[in-house]
Image: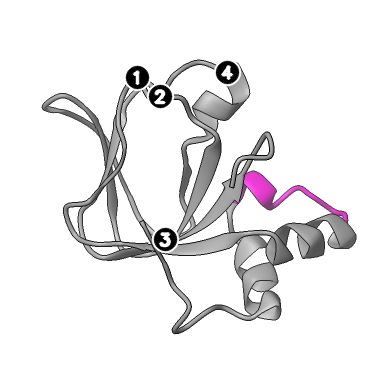
Amino acid sequence: MLKDNSALMSDANRLQFLGKVPIFTRITSEAFLEHLATNLDEVIFTSGQTIFTQGEEGHLLYILVEGKIKIHIEDFPLAQLEPVAYFGEMALLDSQPRSADAIAVSESKCLVLACSGNK
């Protein structure tokens, strides 16, 4: 995972982008979304890079800004994600290990939310 310092999104662009992400569309508190937008890391994954693997402990929620991500269990594909999709939330919500693998299909930029103080 590479932090992308070369072309960081502005807070305003992040806020506008978050408004399109399904998990955040019903949040009406502008202050909450502004706080969230300023506390997300931006990372770049190279094509073919593993983001996480099944069985790992999960403390990060990923929001896909650019690229494509494949979610799969062994050779069985579950989903191919495109921008505004989010993933990694299941491990956060149920406190269980990751249930699948996530791999970047192409170079992909994500906003990352760290939970439980892990960043």
Circles 2 and 1: CB distance less than 8 Å? yes
Secondary structure mostly taken by the magenta-highlighted segment of the chain: loop
Rendered position, 28 above or below 116? below
> How far apart in space, not on screen, are marks 4 and 2 (Cα)?
9 Å
Which structural element holds mark 1?
loop
Rendered position, 86 above or below 8? above
Label 1 belongs to which residue? Answer: 55
The disc labelled 1 sits on which kind of residue? Gly
> How far apart in space, not on screen, are marks 2 and 1 (Cα)?
5 Å
The residue range painted magenta reads: 22-29
Label 4 belongs to which residue? Answer: 95
Q: Is residue 13 left or right of residue 63?
A: right
Label 3 belongs to which residue? Answer: 83
Q: Earlier in the sequence, mark 4 or mark 3?
A: 3
Q: Is residue 16 left or right of residue 29?
A: left
> How far apart in space, not on screen, are marks 4 and 3 (Cα)?
25 Å
Q: Earlier in the sequence, mark 2 or mark 3?
A: 3
Q: Earlier in the sequence, mark 1 or mark 4?
A: 1
Which structural element holds mark 3?
loop
Q: Earlier in the sequence, mark 1 or mark 3?
A: 1
Q: Is residue 99 magenta?
A: no
Which structural element holds mark 4?
loop
Instruction: Point out the residue furthest to the left here.
Output: 75
Q: Which residue does the image show at 47% across and 36% down from the upper left? A: 88
User: Which part of the image, by quadrant, shows the N terminus?
Assistant: bottom left
Q: Nearer the viewer, mark 1 or mark 3?
A: 1
Label 2 belongs to which residue? Answer: 98
The disc labelled 4 sits on which kind of residue? Ser
Crowdedness of circle 3 by 10 Å Cα count: few (<14), some, many (20+)?
some
The disc labelled 3 sits on which kind of residue? Pro
